[in-house]
Image (cartoon, helix red, strand yellow):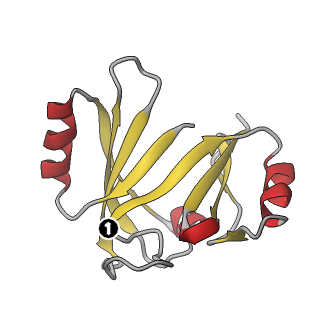
Amino acid sequence: MDHVGVVVDDLAAAIDFFLALGLELEGEASVEGRWVDRVIGLDGVQAKIAMLRTPDGRARVELSRFLTPASPGGAPAAPANALGIRHLSFTVDQLDAVLARLRAHGAELVGELERYRDVYRLCYVRGPAGIIVELAERIG
């Protein structure tokens, strides 16, 4: 597993909470653009993110605050910008084969399979109970 993503409405307070818990801040960034829109299946995404890691470096938490589009709140089939834990991310080899196996178990793409620079091929799939899983294949 690469990281757990949590959408929040107050990024600073969430960072402080996880720092107090003992996680370490790796960095903060703003993300936007067509590539992120297509990966997560939303239009006009503008978000601020922070990445934190456990002290042993084996697990990370990604905190996101969506500026646009506005969050619709919680729901069983919530989109990628709903408040709360929204996806688990896994680094995979042979993304196409993994995606085919997951589709055989009812998984559906949330957005589209996209390439991020020369680093990753990415997609979100919605699995059982609406859980969103991000699949990332390193290509660079």
Q: Splitting the image into 4 quarters, where does residue 39 fall?
A: bottom right
* Residue 38 seen from this side: no
Q: Splitting the image into 4 quarters, where does residue 38 fall?
A: bottom right
- In the image: residue 48, left or right of residue 137: left
List x then y, in percent, for residue 46: 36, 67
Which residue is at the front of the view, 111 or 7? 7
Farthest front residue in view: 129
For the C terminus, give its image quadrant: top right
List x then y, in percent, for residue 9: 21, 65
Q: Residues within 10 Å of mark 1 (few under 14, many from 20)?
A: many
Which residue is at the front of the view, 34 or 122? 122
In the picture shown, does residue 39 fall above or below 12?
A: below
List x then y, in percent, for residue 85: 39, 58
- In the image: residue 12, left or right of residue 61: left
List x then y, in percent, for residue 126: 62, 68
Give the residue at x 12% y 50%: 13
- In the image: residue 18, left or right of residue 45: left
In the picture shown, does residue 111 fall above or below 13?
A: below
For the N terminus, give its image quadrant: top right
Q: Which residue is label 1 attached to?
A: 83
